[in-house]
């Protein structure tokens, strides 16, 4: 079994990913800024022995690098890094102020860069590993979140592509999973009523909202050793909605 680090794993999609890995017997380091929610998640889990909590503020390089050292000290190595931290708010150009723009970039994009920069040297030393970035189909369509969110997630696409050659030569595959309309706290914030959720579901060809387990199962697949040839890809997970123009 592999050692897995899930950053942003206390709630939502990250929580599902961490729990799914743990249920399959992997040792999972779960890092989050919300230690209370993180501890509760672990304590209420049926696989508590496979989950290990770490504090991190992804907007701070010092915090991320310290967390990375602590994880390596405990586990020796990390095979899979999953970055799932992120914030969003549906706002247009005139509504977004500088403070929100900076905060979104600090968490969604700078935090991703810091996390890969902190963990990848250990993977490179072992010449193996997998990095899975939880992105968003909103960076393709420019809809569903806010202008600051689209920009940050688009930046994640570019960052991933810039690493394809450099990390691939060390046996590390890196991919983005770009979900849309997944049942989560973030979805509830964007679509707070049953009517709004039904309206968005009507645009999905397969006729349902995405589930966190849809993402966690794909994360496990692309991070497995058998999937090493999947590298440098943006995997859109949306029930077919994006490519029917919605």
Image (cartoon, helix red, strand yellow):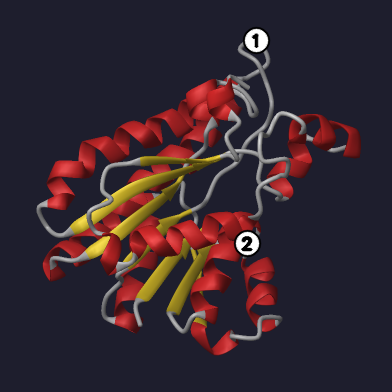
Is residue 117 found left or right of 234 in the rendered image? left
At horizontal 27% and vertical 42% (from top left) the residue drawn is 232
In this rendering, is residue 80 above or below 158?
A: below
| Residue 51, percent from left and from top | 52, 80
- Res 52 visible: no
Which of disc 2 and disc 1 is earlier in sequence? 2
In this rendering, is residue 219 above or below 51?
A: above
Q: What residue does disc 2 label?
A: 34
Quadrant of image for the N terminus: bottom left
At horizontal 59% and vertical 85% (from top left) the residue drawn is 47
In this rendering, is residue 156 above or below 26?
A: above
Q: Please identify the residue farthest to the bottom as the structure is shown.
A: 49
CA separation, marks 1 and 2? 31 Å
Is residue 165 found left or right of 182 in the rendered image? left
Q: Nearer the viewer, residue 143 or 222?
A: 222
Image mark count: 2
Numbered mark located on residue 196 in the image: none
Q: Circle 1 sits in a helix, a strand or a loop, which is it?
A: loop
- Res 231 visible: yes
Q: Nearer the viewer, residue 3 or 152?
A: 3
At horizontal 38% and vertical 53% (from top left) the residue drawn is 132
Q: What residue does disc 1 label?
A: 94
Q: Please identify the residue farthest to the left as the structure is shown.
A: 169
């Amino acid at each position: 079994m592999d050692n897995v680090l899930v950053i942003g794993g206390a709630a939502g999609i990250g929580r599902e990913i961490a729990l799914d890995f743990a249920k399959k017997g992997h040792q999972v380091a779960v890092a989050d800024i919300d230690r209370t929610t993180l501890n509760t998640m672990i304590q209420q889990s049926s696989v508590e022995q496979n989950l290990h909590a770490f504090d991190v503020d992804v907007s701070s390089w010092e915090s991320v690098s310290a967390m990375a050292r602590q994880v390596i000290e405990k586990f020796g190595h990390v095979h899979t890094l999953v970055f799932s931290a992120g914030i969003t708010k549906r706002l247009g150009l005139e509504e977004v102020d500088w403070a929100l723009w900076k905060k979104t970039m600090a968490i969604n994009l700078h935090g991703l860069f810091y996390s890969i920069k902190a963990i990848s040297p250990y993977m490179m030393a072992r010449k193996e590993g997998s990095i899975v970035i939880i992105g968003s189909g909103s960076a393709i369509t420019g809809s569903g979140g806010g202008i600051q969110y689209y920009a940050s997630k688009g930046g994640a696409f570019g960052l991933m592509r810039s690493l394809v050659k450099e990390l691939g030569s060390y046996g590390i595959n890196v991919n983005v999973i770009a979900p849309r309309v997944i049942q989560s706290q973030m979805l509830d914030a964007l679509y707070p009523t049953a009517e709004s959720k039904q309206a968005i579901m009507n645009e999905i060809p397969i006729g349902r909202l995405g589930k966190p387990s849809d993402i966690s199962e794909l994360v496990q697949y692309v991070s497995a050793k058998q999937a090493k040839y999947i590298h440098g890809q943006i995997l859109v997970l949306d029930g077919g909605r994006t490519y029917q123009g919605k």
